[in-house]
Image (cartoon, rainbow, N blue to C red):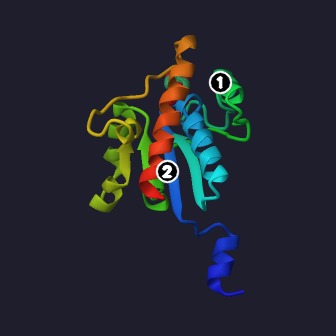
Amino acid sequence: MGFAGFAQQMKYYCDMKVLMVCLGNICRSPLAEGILQTKVQSQGLDWEVDSAGTGAWHVGELPDPRSVQVARENGIDITYQRARQFQVQDLDNYDLIFAMDQSNLANILRKAHTSAQEKKVHLIMNQVDPNANISVPDPYYDDDGFEQVFAMLDQACDRIIEQWV
Ligand code: 4NP
């Protein structure tokens, strides 16, 4: 086969590569990944969706059971995911990088060296409320926060698809 066919088969090529980023990669960004992945699949889009954390504490772990639970209640399985740390190469390997909160955003932008890299990085809730700079609250220490996080991310992922399809 030609290179295009090879690249497609190897998943080196797709229409959009999206990375969701939070702190631990066990609560918020795994939900964002699972929600967007589900919408992408149901619309038949050739997008790649992944997530990462700016911190390394939970590398290799499954998503937090509370995220697994709220995802499952909404028909989404996120148990295939394993936490990984955000890497500087992600700024080149992805087309769109969504930070869950202002702290994640600052940490990602600190690693960017070019304006092309900086332009890929967005605060995810600005998709819903442009320039409002609203953070997705960290639910790690708040058992009640997961449903609100899911609802916020569900709305944001609809807007992401609307804007970039
Ligand atoms: P996340 O939540 O960034 O949404 O995955 C957190 C998970 C773990 C920690 C903090 C936030 N932690 O400090 O271990």
Q: Residues within 10 Å of mark 1 (few under 14, many from 20)?
A: some
Q: Position of residue 163 (x, y in %)?
A: 41, 53
Tell me the number on the disc at residue 85.
none
Q: Secondary structure at mark 2?
A: helix
Q: Quadrant of the N terminus?
A: bottom right
Between 1 and 157, the one nearer to me in the picture: 157
Q: Where 29 falls versus 143 (above or below)? A: below
Tell me the amino acid under the disc marked 1: Val
Q: Is residue 154 left or right of residue 107?
A: right
Residue denoted by label 1: 70
Q: Residues within 10 Å of mark 2 (few under 14, many from 20)?
A: some
Q: Point out the tag, 2 or 1, that comes first from the N-terminus.
A: 1
Q: Is residue 67 visible?
A: yes
Q: Which residue sits at x=68%, y=28%?
A: 68
Q: Which residue sits at x=47%, y=22%?
A: 138
Q: Position of residue 87 (x, y in %)?
A: 48, 49
Q: CA distance from mark 2 to mark 1?
A: 22 Å
Q: How many marks?
A: 2
Q: Are marks 2 and 1 in contact (CB under 8 Å)?
A: no
Q: Position of residue 64 (x, y in %)?
A: 64, 25
Residue denoted by label 2: 161
Q: Is residue 150 left or right of residue 126?
A: right
Between 73 and 52, the one nearer to me in the picture: 73
Q: Secondary structure at mark 1?
A: helix
Q: Is residue 88 visible?
A: no
Q: Which residue sits at x=70%, y=72%?
A: 9
Q: Position of residue 154 (x, y in %)?
A: 53, 35
In the image, the residue with mark 1 has its CB under 8 Å from the nearest atom of ligand 1 = no
Tell me the amino acid under the disc marked 2: Ile
Q: Where 153 falls versus 147 (above or below)? A: below
